[in-house]
Amino acid sequence: MTTPGPGEVPRTARQADAVARAVAVLDRLRSPGGCPWYAVQTHASLLPYAVEEAHELVEAVEAGDRAGLREELGDVLLQVLVHARVAEEHEDDPFDVADVAEALVAKLVRRNPHVFAADGDGGIDVAAVLERWDRLKRAEKPTRTSALDGVPATIGALARAQKLVARADQAGLLAAAPPPTRPVGDAADVEALGDALLGLVAAAHRAGVDAEAALRLATATWEAAARRAEG
């Protein structure tokens, strides 16, 4: 971390001030006399925007668009701030953005003892960090009895398959329950096609390839060719 020069505002102070101003703007938009659109939003009504902004963030990263990345990160931050502002108004269980941030800090510190504990093992490698993170997470969530619990059912089928295969591999389950490998004989055979797709996800995992990103790249390449043919 660099030391601020004469007249420079410390980095953390600048960040805190900027976030505080964003919270204040959101509060103004949501409060009486503010924006009627923000006034009527609920957690449920905001969900499509959260999903959309996350996808636009991915798009900016994959395109190497630095200006777009900064903008999309702001849009993702907006989703956090507006949900936290709506949560303040809950009659029985209100919380605000400070509660959200404090819970996040506590979780990061708790799950990274190699960094924050007095006797932290700073030489730990990435694999050990991930194993410990999962172990601590399971201890925090005793209702989850399977290594496959906690993967949202609402994410895309390919992304969910990829996440489940990775979880199963980490838990040593792939040998006992290997993903299917049968080829597709008839494209109309839905079960066979599904098995083939799942087998491709497993093959991508074994090769260290992000199946979701690979499919996006292939689709983009094909889309460009189709657009050229269209013209």
Image: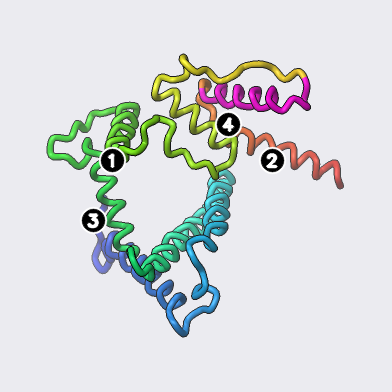
Closer to the chain start, of discs 3 and 1, is 3
* Residue 3 numbered tag: 3
Instruction: Please tell me which residue lies in front, 215 or 169.
Output: 169
Closer to the chain start, of discs 4 and 1, is 1
Helix or strand or loop: what does disc 4 sit on?
helix
Q: Chief secondary structure of the magenta span?
A: helix
Closer to the chain start, of discs 2 and 3, is 3
Q: Which residue is mark 2?
A: 220
Helix or strand or loop: what does disc 2 sit on?
helix
Q: Amino acid at mark 1?
A: Glu
Report the residue that reaches farthest toward the bottom: 33
| Viewer-side label of 3, 1 | 1
Magenta span contains residue 201: yes
Instruction: Please tell me which residue lies in front, 112 or 226.
Output: 112
Question: Where in the figure is residue 11, as x and y percent of width and height?
Answer: 29, 60
Residue at x-position 47% and y-position 19%: 174
Dots 4, 3 in contact, CB < 8 A: no
Dots 4, 1 in contact, CB < 8 A: no
Residue at x-position 53% and y-position 41%: 153
Task: Please tell me whether residue 72 is drawn above or below residue 223 in the rendered image.
Answer: below
Q: Which residue is mark 1?
A: 140
Q: Using residue 42 as the reference point, say whether residue 84 is left or right of it.
A: left
Helix or strand or loop: what does disc 1 sit on?
helix
